[in-house]
Image (spheres, rainbow, N blue to C red):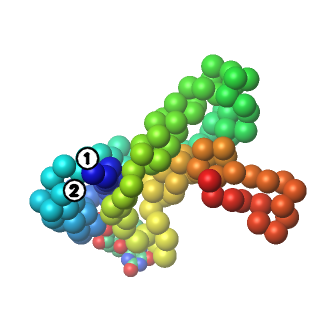
Amino acid sequence: MINLLHLDASPRGERSHTRRLTAEFVGEWRKAYPLDAVTYRDIGRNPIPHVTEDWIAGAFTPSERRTGSMRAALRLSDELVDEFLTADLIVAGIPFYNFGMPSGFKAYIDQIVRVGRTFSFNPDNKKAPFQPL
Ligand SMILES: Cc1cc2nc3c(=O)[nH]c(=O)nc-3n(C[C@H](O)[C@H](O)[C@H](O)COP(=O)(O)O)c2cc1C
C-alpha cells in the first residue's frame, strides 16, 4: 500500500485540462490499487500563502527557540511538509503560465522547501551546499 498525494494547481474548475488529466490518472490508480491512500490538495482553488518575514526567521531558528508568531507562520508549512514527506507518489496538475509554473504552485514549493526537513545545508561544502535529505 502506498500514499498518493494528488495536487491541482489550476484556478480553473470544469474547464481545466490539468485537473481532468490528474483526475483521470488518480481514478485509474484507485481502480488498480483500491487499498492505496489518496490525499487531495487543491492549491488552485485554495491558494497557498507566500512566505513572510516571520516564516523565514522561523525556518532558520531552532524549533525550541521560535517565537509564537514564527510558529504560527510555519504552521501550514509544517502541515504541507508532513503531507509531502508521507507521500510515496505525487500527481500534480500544473498549468504552464508565461513559460513557468503558476505563482500559486511556486508558493507551495516555497512552503515545502524547508531546511532540516526537506533539505540540509552544509556551509563548509562549497561545491554542493544543498543536499537533499
Ligand atoms: C496567465 C496564463 C499564462 C499562460 N502562459 C502560457 C505559456 O507561456 N505557454 C503556453 O504554452 N501556454 C500558456 N498558457 C496556456 C495554459 O497553459 C493552458 O491554458 C492550460 O490549459 C492551463 O491549464 P488548465 O487548463 O488546467 O487551467 C497560459 C495561460 C494563462 C491563463
Residue occupying the point 77% across, 60% down: 129
Residue 36, above or below 56:
below
Residue that appears at 73% across and 23% down: 65
Tell me the quarter of the picture where residue 97 sits: bottom left
Number of numbered discs on residues = 2
Q: Nearer the viewer, residue 100 or 116?
A: 116
Residue, disc 2: 13
User: 130 or 109, which is in the foreground?
Assistant: 130
Q: Nearer the viewer, residue 12 or 81?
A: 81
Which quarter is ligand 1 in? bottom left
- Which tag is nearer the camera, tag 2 or tag 1? 1
Q: Position of residue 38 (x, y in %)?
A: 26, 48
3D distance between C-alphas at marks 2 and 1: 24 Å
Q: Is residue 70 left or right of residue 98?
A: right
- Image marks 2 and 1: residues in contact by CB distance under 8 Å: no
Of the numbered discs 2 and 1, the one sitting upstream in the chain is: 2
Residue 4 visible at all: yes
The amino acid marked with disc number 1 is: Ala
